[in-house]
Image: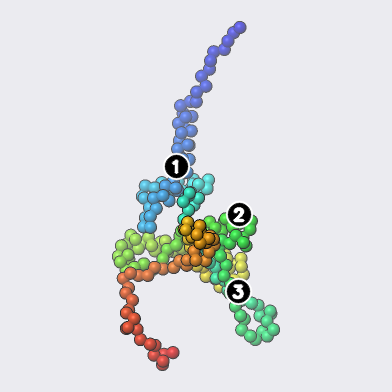
């Protein structure tokens, strides 16, 4: 019986190099955004990881590899919410006397809100939107000492412009969706209760005491408040 010789089926060298190159590019795309996030501080990002993320940005966004890896970390931090203060004008035809001034109905809603945003996927989208909005926050003012650093001041101006444009876009979209005439957005933070609060005080996760309003600007440490004894009562003529 005639036997056939063994045929070597090894991958050609050129194909191995091609597959290695593709795998390396994909791994860089997977690691680029987490490395930039991990090296990020309140002031800047590691230059090497920033360059890597910018280089792989198109590929990472195409395959949606630039999402928040640290959001589902085993040690979660406080949650961020968006408070929407909505004002809606009533139609004049709804009033018994059209000569009366049109009243404004005010309402406050939260994003996300699992009671009103269903299915769960819709709630999750608003949750990620709130986290993204808060991550882009930049204070409306910085101290005079910080303005002396041109690199820091330039980065702050760029971040503030991005934050304001994002805020305006969200307000425009929400006003159209809710039919509101005026809307303002506020940032809230819900802290996690301590083990003592949960075990001894039975504090629920949605306890109002855990909710804090985040300021849009930080107080300037270079400005000193006047002593209380120097403050005078307002002049009656000016009232």
The residue pinned by badge 1 equals 28
Label placed on residue 193: none
* C-alpha gap between disc 3 and disc 2: 28 Å
* C-alpha gap between disc 2 and disc 1: 29 Å
* Residue found at the very far front of the displayed protein: 200
Mark 3 element type:
strand
| Dots 3, 2 in contact, CB < 8 A | no
Residue 167, visible in the rendered structure: no
- Tell me residue 39's x, y (percent): 39, 50
Q: Residues within 10 Å of mark 2 (few under 14, many from 20)?
A: few
- Tell me residue 160's x, y (percent): 42, 64
- Tell me residue 113's x, y (percent): 58, 62
* C-alpha gap between disc 1 and disc 3: 49 Å
Of residue 85 and residue 47, the one placed in the foreground of this image is 85
Q: Quadrant of the N terminus?
A: top right
Label placed on residue 88: 3
Q: Residues within 10 Å of mark 3 (few under 14, many from 20)?
A: some
Q: Earlier in the sequence, mark 2 or mark 1?
A: 1
- Tell me residue 100's x, y (percent): 63, 85
What's the residue at 48%, 37% (across, down)?
22
What's the residue at 49%, 66% (across, down)?
209
Q: Quadrant of the C terminus?
A: bottom left
Label placed on residue 121: 2
Of residue 70 and residue 32, the one placed in the foreground of this image is 70
């Amino acid at each position: 019986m005639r036997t056939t010789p063994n045929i070597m089926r090894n991958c050609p060298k050129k194909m191995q190099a091609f597959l290695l190159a593709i795998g390396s590019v994909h791994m860089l795309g997977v690691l680029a955004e987490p490395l930039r996030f991990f090296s990020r501080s309140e002031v800047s990002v590691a230059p090497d990881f920033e360059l890597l993320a910018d280089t792989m940005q198109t590929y990472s966004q195409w395959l949606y590899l630039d999402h928040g890896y640290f959001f589902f970390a085993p040690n979660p931090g406080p949650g961020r919410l968006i408070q929407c203060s909505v004002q809606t004008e009533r139609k004049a035809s709804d009033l018994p006397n059209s000569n009366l001034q049109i009243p404004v109905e005010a309402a406050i809603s939260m994003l996300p809100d699992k009671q009103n945003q269903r299915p769960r996927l819709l709630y999750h989208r608003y949750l990620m939107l709130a986290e993204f909005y808060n991550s882009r926050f930049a204070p409306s003012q910085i101290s005079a000492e910080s303005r002396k650093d041109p690199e820091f001041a330039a980065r702050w101006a760029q971040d503030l412009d991005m934050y304001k444009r994002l805020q305006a876009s969200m307000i425009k979209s929400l006003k159209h969706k809710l039919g509101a005439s005026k809307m303002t957005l506020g940032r809230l933070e819900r802290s996690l209760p301590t083990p003592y609060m949960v075990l001894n005080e039975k504090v629920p996760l949605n306890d109002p005491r855990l909710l804090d309003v985040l300021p849009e600007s930080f107080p300037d440490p270079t400005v000193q408040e006047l002593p209380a004894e120097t403050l005078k009562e307002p002049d009656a003529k000016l009232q």
